[in-house]
């Protein structure tokens, strides 16, 4: 009798373990992904070595921070500046989207006049040869504009290459919290 009870308990534990592993696997594939920031291109918003959760659910909005595939083995993390159909221009260190000026408060810590402009003047056409961000693509920049390989260098990013939005820093504990837009 005791042996039968032990087998039933072992079966219940095995079933619970399999369900837990299955649930974590499904969540990892379809809902979230842990990522470690590698490099200084998103300073001061994100720091080298920050551990983050990337949310794979929801549409990408302007100024979201996203992770995307650059190559099969390499992912970047950058901020979405332009959405499909947007006309992007930087003039005198100011962002204009479709002719409207947008403030970029996340750049405040990078603005030191003695170093010159944070973002040099350009238009999307200067960089990519097209007037507007193509359908199904986004234009991205790092917050540390002087030290970022982004759409100015690699072109626009296809939506299908986006892993997800970076929403939460969970390590180090001193930086723990939601990512600022």
Image: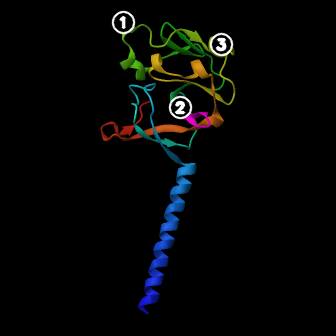
Q: Identify which residue, 24 or 165, lies in the foreground.
A: 24
Q: Residue 124: image x %, image y %?
A: 62, 15
Viewed as shown, does residue 157 lie left or right of 28?
Answer: right
Name the mark nearer the viewer: 1 or 3.
Answer: 1
Expressed as whole percent of the image width and height from the top left, the position of residue 143 reads: 45, 23
Outermost residue, left direction? 174
Which residue carries the number 2 mark?
A: 76
Q: Secondary structure at mark 2?
A: strand
Q: Within the magenta stretch, is there residue 70?
A: yes
Quarter the C terminus occupies: top left
Picture coordinates of residue 62 (x, y %)? 54, 28
Q: Nearer the viewer, residue 172 or 74?
A: 74
Asked if labels 3 and 1 touch by Cβ distance under 8 angstroms, the answer is: no
Q: What range of the chain is rendered magenta?
A: 67-75
- At numbered mark 3, what does the secondary structure look like: helix, strand or loop? helix
Classify mark 2: residues with Cα within 10 Å, few (<14), some (14-19) or many (20+): some
Pointer 2 or 3: first along the chain? 2
Q: CA distance from mark 2 to mark 3?
A: 23 Å
Q: Quadrant of the N terminus?
A: bottom left
Q: CA distance from mark 1 to mark 3?
A: 29 Å
- Relative placement, left or right, of 86 versus 147 is right
Residue 125 circle label: 3
Q: Earlier in the sequence, mark 1 or mark 2?
A: 2
The image shows residue 104, relative to residue 22, as above or below, that is: above
- Number of the label disc, if any, that sits on residue 114: 1
* Magenta segment includes 160: no
Residue 170, image quadrant: top left
């Amino acid at each position: 009798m005791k042996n039968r009870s032990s087998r039933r308990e072992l079966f219940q534990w095995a079933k619970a373990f399999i369900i837990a592993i299955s649930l974590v696997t499904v969540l990892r594939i379809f809902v979230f992904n842990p990522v470690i920031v590698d490099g200084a291109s998103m300073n001061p918003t994100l720091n080298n070595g920050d551990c983050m959760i990337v949310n794979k659910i929801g549409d990408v909005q302007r100024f979201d921070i996203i992770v995307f595939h650059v190559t099969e083995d390499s992912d970047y993390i950058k901020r979405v500046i332009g959405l499909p159909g947007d006309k992007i221009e930087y003039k005198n260190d100011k962002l204009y989207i479709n002719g409207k000026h947008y403030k970029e408060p996340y750049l405040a810590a990078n603005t030191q006049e003695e170093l010159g402009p944070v973002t040099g003047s350009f238009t999307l056409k200067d960089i990519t040869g097209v007037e507007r961000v193509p359908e199904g693509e986004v234009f991205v920049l790092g917050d540390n504009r002087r030290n970022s390989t982004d759409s100015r260098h690699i072109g626009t990013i296809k939506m299908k290459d986006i892993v997800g939005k970076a929403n939460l820093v969970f390590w180090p504990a001193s930086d723990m919290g939601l990512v600022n837009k």
